[in-house]
Amino acid sequence: MWAAISQLLSFAGNLADELIDTPEEKAAATQKILGALQVVDLKQLDINAIDAQSKHFWQYGWRPAIGWTCASAIFFQFFLSPLLSWLFVFGGWDIPPLPKFDDYLWELVAAMLGVAGLRSYDKMKKTTR
């Protein structure tokens, strides 16, 4: 998402450089673009607030579900998988290598930690469960 916004701002900046001559006009055009992006952000906040007030678990429970999925994957990778590997080697059984998670898990966890901070803020303000 941030890449798309960055590309949009870059495109708008290049377009402004080609079409607008004075620095004041460029600054005004940039302000209009930033204002439009802010409106989009505010509308998304409104949608998030409505979503958080839902009575349906499938609507308000998706963030905790992703959080528990990430926690389970980390638990498997750093606790359960080494323990099982050790037990199988100790028991003398040959097993194929257990699956390992790649960097995509960490990207998801990092994103969830950011979302979790916003969720805590929502809970403090009592806009969500």
Image (cartoon, rainbow, N blue to C red):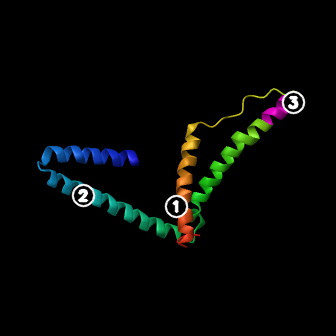
Q: What type is the residue that disc 2 sits on?
A: Gln
Q: What type is the residue that disc 3 sits on?
A: Phe
Q: Which mark is residue 118?
A: 1
SS for dot 3 = helix
Q: Main secondary structure of the magenta part?
A: helix
Q: Which mark is residue 40?
A: none
Return the disc, 2 or 3, that comes first in the chain's sequence.
Answer: 2
Return the disc, 3 or 1, that comes first in the chain's sequence.
Answer: 3
Mark 3 or 1, closer to the camera: 1
- The percent coordinates of residue 57 (x first, y second) are 60, 66
Q: Which mark is residue 90?
A: 3
Q: Nearer the viewer, residue 123 or 25?
A: 25
- The percent coordinates of residue 111 (x first, y second) are 53, 50
What is the C-alpha distance between the residues marked 1 and 2?
Answer: 27 Å
- The percent coordinates of residue 30 (x first, y second) are 23, 54
- Tally of numbered tags: 3
Label 3 packing within 10 angstroms: few (<14), some (14-19), many (20+)? few
- The percent coordinates of residue 41 (x first, y second) are 38, 61
Q: Quadrant of the C terminus?
A: bottom right
